[in-house]
Image (tube, rainbow, N blue to C red):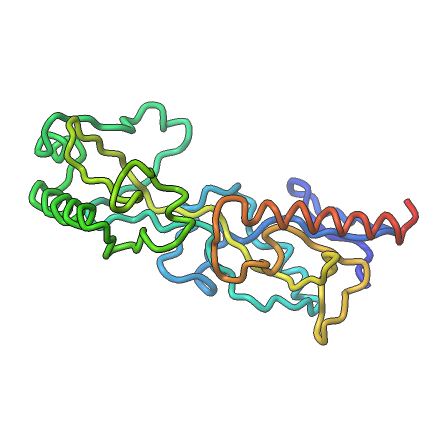
C-alpha cells in the first residue's frame, strides 16, 4: 500500500503522507539521458527535447520499485525533423528572437547561399519533388493515401492536395532542428487510472496520469492532442473515484 511520497524540495528531503491517495503525474523521462539511451531509438539527446528540465521519469522509476507494471518501451512523442543537408545546435528561447528564422531570396542559388546548403543538392531535391507533385505521388513520405493527409491538404491543388510544385518566386528557407515533444509510456493502469501490479492487480492507493502511464495509443503518435486528451480524461476518472472512495 502506498502511504505517501518521499521527495526533494530544493536540497531538503521531505516526506509527505496521505490518508487518501497518491497520483503520479510527473510526466515522462525526456530529460533523462540514461533512460533515453535504454528505451529510445538512437540518437537520443535530452537537449533536443522541448520539455522542462525535471522531466526525468521519477514517477515511473518509483512505481517500478514497488512492482508496478510498465509494459511499453516508451517512444518519443514527436517528429524527427532532421535534414541531412543541415546540422546545428538549437539556441535557447532567449536567443531565438536574435536569430534569422526565415530566409527569402529571388533565386534558388541565393537562397542556398543564405542558408548554407549545396546548390546542386537543393536543385536536385526541388526537381525531384516537383516531378512527384505533378504526378500526385509522394515516393518519400507517402502523403497521399489517407483521409487524414487529405484533410490537411489544399483541395485547390491537384492531383494531390498535399503536394504543390515549388516554382513561384520568391523562395523561402527555414532552419529545422532535430527535436522531440517528450516521451510517452509508463505504468499500466485500469479504466480508473489505478496503477496495476503483476497479475493486473491495482496497487492500493496509487494512481497515475499523463506521460507517466502506458499510452492508450501504444508506440504510435496519432496527432496533436493525443497525450492531452487521455491525460485529462483518466485524471478526472481517478479523482472522481478517489473522491467517492475517500468521502472527501
Left/right of residue 201 with respect to residue 246 in the rendered view: left
- Tell me the quarter of the image containing the C terminus: top right
* Number of disc labels: 0
- Tell me the quarter of the image containing the N terminus: bottom right
Q: Residue furthest bottom?
A: 199
Picture coordinates of residue 172, whole percent (x, y): 21, 30
Left/right of residue 216 with respect to residue 196 in the rendered view: left
Q: Residue furthest right?
A: 247
x 75%, y 50%: residue: 237
x 71%, y 48%: residue: 235
Is 198 rendered above or below residue 163?
Answer: below
Task: Report which quarter residue 88 is drawn in.
Answer: top left
Left/right of residue 65 with respect to residue 18 in the rendered view: left
Task: Report which quarter residue 97 is drawn in.
Answer: top left
Picture coordinates of residue 226, whole percent (x, y): 54, 49
Picture coordinates of residue 54, whole percent (x, y): 56, 45
x 59%, y 45%: residue: 228
Q: Residue furthest top?
A: 98
x 88%, y 50%: residue: 244
Left/right of residue 36 with respect to residue 216 in the rendered view: left
Q: Nearest the camera: 118 or 94?
A: 118
Picture coordinates of residue 233, whole percent (x, y): 68, 48
Amino acid at each position: 500500500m502506498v502511504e505517501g511520497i518521499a521527495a526533494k524540495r530544493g536540497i531538503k528531503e521531505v516526506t509527505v503522507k496521505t490518508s487518501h491517495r497518491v497520483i503520479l503525474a510527473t510526466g515522462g523521462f525526456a530529460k533523462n539521458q540514461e533512460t533515453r539511451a535504454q528505451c529510445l531509438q538512437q540518437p537520443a539527446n535530452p537537449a533536443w527535447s522541448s520539455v522542462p528540465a525535471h522531466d526525468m521519469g521519477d514517477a515511473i522509476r518509483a512505481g517500478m520499485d514497488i512492482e508496478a507494471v510498465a509494459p511499453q518501451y516508451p517512444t518519443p512523442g514527436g517528429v524527427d525533423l532532421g535534414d541531412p543537408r543541415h546540422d546545428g545546435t538549437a539556441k535557447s528561447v532567449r536567443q531565438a528572437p536574435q536569430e534569422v528564422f526565415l530566409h527569402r531570396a529571388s533565386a534558388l542559388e541565393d537562397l542556398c547561399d543564405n542558408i548554407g546548403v549545396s546548390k546542386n543538392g537543393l536543385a536536385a531535391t526541388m526537381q525531384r519533388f516537383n516531378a512527384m507533385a505533378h504526378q500526385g505521388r509522394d515516393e518519400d513520405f507517402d502523403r497521399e493515401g489517407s483521409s487524414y493527409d487529405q484533410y490537411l491538404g489544399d483541395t485547390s491543388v491537384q492531383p494531390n492536395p498535399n503536394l504543390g510544385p515549388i516554382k513561384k518566386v520568391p523562395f523561402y528557407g527555414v532552419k529545422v532542428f532535430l527535436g522531440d515533444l517528450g516521451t510517452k509510456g509508463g505504468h499500466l493502469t485500469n479504466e480508473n487510472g489505478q496503477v496495476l501490479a503483476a497479475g493486473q492487480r491495482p496497487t492500493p492507493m496509487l494512481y497515475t496520469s499523463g506521460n507517466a502511464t502506458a499510452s492508450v495509443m501504444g508506440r504510435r503518435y496519432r496527432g496533436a492532442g493525443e497525450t492531452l486528451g487521455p491525460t485529462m480524461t483518466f485524471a478526472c476518472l481517478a479523482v472522481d473515484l478517489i473522491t467517492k472512495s475517500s468521502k472527501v
